[in-house]
Image: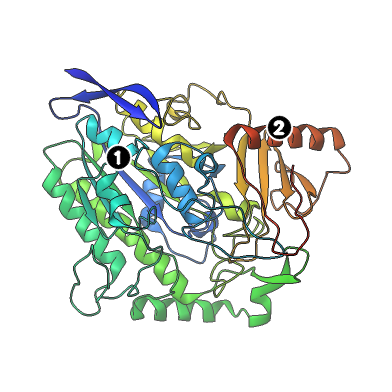
């Protein structure tokens, strides 16, 4: 029997479904990987340097979205969008918590917390009768008050305010929400084991397991035997240091080109990817062993693009340009898989542009829970696409807003994708770039002067969206010039 609960969300009264007994929908397991590039996985790039057989296994029974996007080119804002179904710009959560790098100008103000007033995906599923657990990287608030247990999760293993593992990837972890294991225990393996244990504990109820890996974020650390295997593999490729990098990514006007990796060959990063893949496989095996796979929806995504222009530049996102911290496709296009037993069993692909905001309404829809449009206001249910009933969504554009200087060299800017056209606007000087992604997925050929009518139309729509979501922009440094504003 479904009952209704009145809840005030961000000053608005809405009705939320609740059940007195266990939830009736399928189990849900959500894998989120940190800094994983879309070209790092075999389902998206069969010639990748990395070995990901378990993700290929998952993709074979998933809808594989080939134009899946994060809401931001860095981590915390995309994580915010997953939990809330909203563009993070609506609350000013537009950079990683708490990124304050300055360049020619000061960045826009940053709100580095997910407000407790948000009715998160975890809270929606818990209210509907699901047992909920969070594991891994949270990075959505400065204190325990804003941690997973305050946002709808019954269990929290490893999630708190930091964005990378404080003690590194080997025990002791120096994490107040994760007990140390034996010396040398690997964090990714540990989280997979904890997730498998929770699945066993929850097997008689409906559950939502959100396994948010710290991998493959820096520091680059992996198990020795796996690193050695990839060192041998890299040696067989005979790729010189000079051939691995190119100096081509132009950053904000005061700086020169930034070196970007163009060949996947980093042994430690490859070993980290493989460990993540094996962790996914361990969870899949647990579901199989317990007979739960036929009633468990599985989602897989990354929070932003692969790290290719800084901090060791461990991966290449080619043919996509840029990477983490950039508004180019390499920074925002993500692996995006949804496996729904009985619906996506034979796999398949979908090129309709979708975003991290869409998971919230999609999972409620799959679970048979009434949607909450006042909460997940920027997300759409993908159920019609998953069922093959539609070839488009009732949304004509996706938007991005990043009024910051990224640690990876990316410039402050905004972007809009509508159809195959994508426009990028730079916030330092207002310059725009227009690309046709159907012909130029690498964003090398700027069409802004060739198609001024398209560029003008997209720019007006982007500016209208800025107003709708209350976007903020760069600020002058003391005694310095005023930045451009729309």
| Residue 281: image location, x then y, percent | 30, 55
Q: Residues within 10 Å of mark 2 (few under 14, many from 20)?
A: some
Q: Which residue is located at x 61 percent, y 44 percent?
A: 400
Instruction: Identify the residue position indicated by label 2 in the image.
Output: 461
Residue 105 versus residue 230 in the image, above or below: above
Question: Which image quadrant for residue 322?
Answer: bottom right
| Residue 248: image location, x then y, percent | 74, 67
Quadrant including the N terminus: top left
| Residue 418: image location, x then y, percent | 67, 34
Q: Nearer the viewer, residue 469 or 133?
A: 469
Q: Which residue is located at x 21 percent, y 46 percent?
A: 288
| Residue 164: image location, x then y, percent | 40, 66
Q: Which residue is located at x 67 percent, y 33 percent?
A: 419
- Mark 1 and mark 2 in contact (Cβ < 8 Å)? no
Q: Nearer the viewer, residue 286 or 435?
A: 435
112 lies left or right of 16:
right
Q: Secondary structure at mark 1?
A: helix
251 lies left or right of 330:
right
Q: Secondary structure at mark 2?
A: helix
Q: Whole-Å distance between the Cαs marked 2 and 1?
A: 33 Å
Instruction: Identify the residue position indicated by label 1 in the image.
Output: 122
Q: Residues within 10 Å of mark 1 (few under 14, many from 20)?
A: many
Label 2 vs 1, first from the N-terminus? 1
Residue 41, labelled with which disc? Answer: none
Residue 18 versus residue 153 in the image, above or below: above
User: In the orientation shown, which residue stands out farthest toward the front?
Assistant: 479
Q: Nearer the viewer, residue 238 or 263?
A: 263
174 lies left or right of 85:
left
């Amino acid at each position: 029997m479904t009952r209704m609960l009145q809840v005030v969300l961000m000053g608005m009264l809405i009705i939320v479904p609740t059940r007195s007994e266990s939830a009736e929908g399928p189990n849900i397991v959500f894998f989120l990987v940190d800094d994983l590039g879309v070209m790092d996985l075999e389902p998206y790039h069969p010639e990748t340097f990395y070995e990901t057989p378990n993700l290929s296994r998952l993709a074979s029974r998933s809808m594989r979205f080939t134009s899946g996007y994060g809401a931001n080119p860095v981590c915390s804002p995309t994580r915010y969008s997953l939990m809330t179904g909203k563009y993070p710009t609506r609350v000013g959560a537009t950079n990683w918590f708490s990124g304050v790098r300055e360049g020619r100008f000061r960045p826009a103000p940053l709100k580095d917390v997910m407000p407790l007033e948000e009715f998160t995906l975890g809270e929606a599923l818990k209210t509907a009768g699901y047992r909920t657990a969070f594991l891994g990287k949270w990075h959505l608030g400065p204190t325990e008050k804003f941690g997973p247990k305050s946002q709808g999760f019954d269990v929290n293993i490893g999630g708190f305010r930091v964005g990378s593992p404080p003690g590194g990837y080997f025990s002791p972890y120096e994490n107040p929400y994760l007990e140390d294991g034996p010396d040398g225990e690997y964090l990714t393996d540990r989280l997979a084991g904890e997730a498998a244990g929770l699945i066993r504990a929850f097997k008689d109820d409906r559950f939502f397991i959100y396994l948010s890996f710290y991998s493959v974020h820096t520091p680059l650390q992996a198990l020795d035997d796996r690193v050695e295997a990839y060192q041998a593999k890299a040696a067989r490729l005979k790729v010189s240091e000079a051939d691995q990098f190119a100096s081509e990514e132009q950053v904000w006007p005061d700086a020169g080109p930034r070196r970007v990796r163009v060949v996947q060959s980093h042994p430690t990063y490859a070993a980290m990817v493989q460990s993540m893949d094996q962790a996914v496989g361990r969870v899949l095996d647990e579901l199989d062993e317990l007979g739960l796979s036929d009633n468990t929806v599985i989602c897989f995504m990354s929070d932003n693009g692969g790290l290719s222009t800084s901090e060791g530049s461990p991966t290449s996102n080619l043919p996509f340009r840029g990477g983490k911290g950039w508004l180019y496709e390499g920074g925002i296009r993500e692996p995006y898989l949804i496996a729904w037993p009985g619906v996506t069993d034979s796999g398949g692909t979908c090129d309709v542009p979708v975003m991290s905001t869409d998971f919230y309404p999609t999972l409620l829809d799959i679970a048979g829970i009434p949607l909450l449009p006042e909460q997940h206001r920027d997300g759409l249910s993908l159920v019609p696409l998953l069922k093959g009933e539609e070839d488009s969504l009732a949304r004509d554009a996706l938007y991005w807003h990043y009024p910051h200087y990224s640690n990876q060299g990316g410039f402050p800017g905004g972007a809009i994708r509508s159809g195959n056209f994508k426009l990028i606007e730079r916030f330092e000087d207002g310059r725009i770039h227009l690309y046709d992604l159907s012909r130029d997925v690498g964003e090398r050929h700027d069409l802004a002067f060739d198609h001024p009518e398209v560029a003008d139309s997209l720019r007006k729509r982007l500016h209208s969206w800025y107003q709708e979501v209350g976007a903020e922009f760069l600020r002058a440094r003391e005694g310095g010039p005023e930045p451009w504003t729309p």
